[in-house]
């Protein structure tokens, strides 16, 4: 990862979502994944519902 312009080794975890595109619009799936990513990166968001 790049932190402050410097490459720094950090643990990373990939996340993927499988869904039936006939039922769920792709933009809703992307919004859901982004919300999960934001919550994992900053757990305070879960408590404060930001």
Image: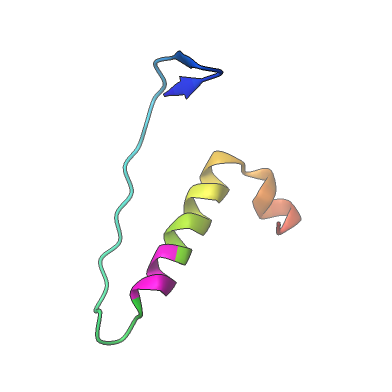
Residue at position x 46%, y 65% in the image: 32
Q: Residue 21 occupies which quadrant of the picture?
A: bottom left
Indicate whether 41 appears above or below 32.
above
Indicate whether 27 appears above or below 7.
below
Residue 50 belongs to magenta span? no
Residue located farthest toward the bottom when viewing the structure as drawn: 23
Front residue of 22/47: it is 22
Residue 29 belongs to magenta span? yes
Give the colour scheme of this rendering. rainbow
Q: Residue 19 occupies which quadrant of the picture?
A: bottom left
Indicate whether 4 appears above or below 48.
above
Residue 10: % across, % down: 42, 21
Residue at position x 52%, y 58% in the image: 35
Front residue of 6/45: it is 6
Q: Is residue 45 left or right of residue 18?
A: right
The stretch of residues the image draws in magenta is: 26-30
Q: Residue 20 occupies which quadrant of the picture?
A: bottom left
Image quarter where the C terminus lies is bottom right
Indicate whether 14 appears above or below 33.
above
Residue 12: % across, % down: 37, 31
Residue 37: % across, % down: 48, 49
Q: Is residue 18 left or right of residue 28?
A: left
Image quarter where the N terminus lies is top left
Residue located farthest toward the right when viewing the structure as drawn: 48
Residue at position x 71%, y 52% in the image: 47
Residue 23: % across, % down: 30, 86
Residue located farthest toward the front when viewing the structure as drawn: 5
Q: Does the magenta stretch mainly form a helix, a strand or a loop?
A: helix
| Total labels drawn | 0
């Amino acid at each position: 990862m790049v932190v402050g312009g410097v490459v720094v080794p950090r643990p990373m975890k990939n996340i993927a979502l499988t869904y039936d595109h006939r039922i769920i619009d792709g933009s809703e799936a992307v919004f859901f994944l982004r919300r999960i990513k934001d919550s994992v990166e900053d757990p305070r968001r879960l408590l404060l519902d930001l």
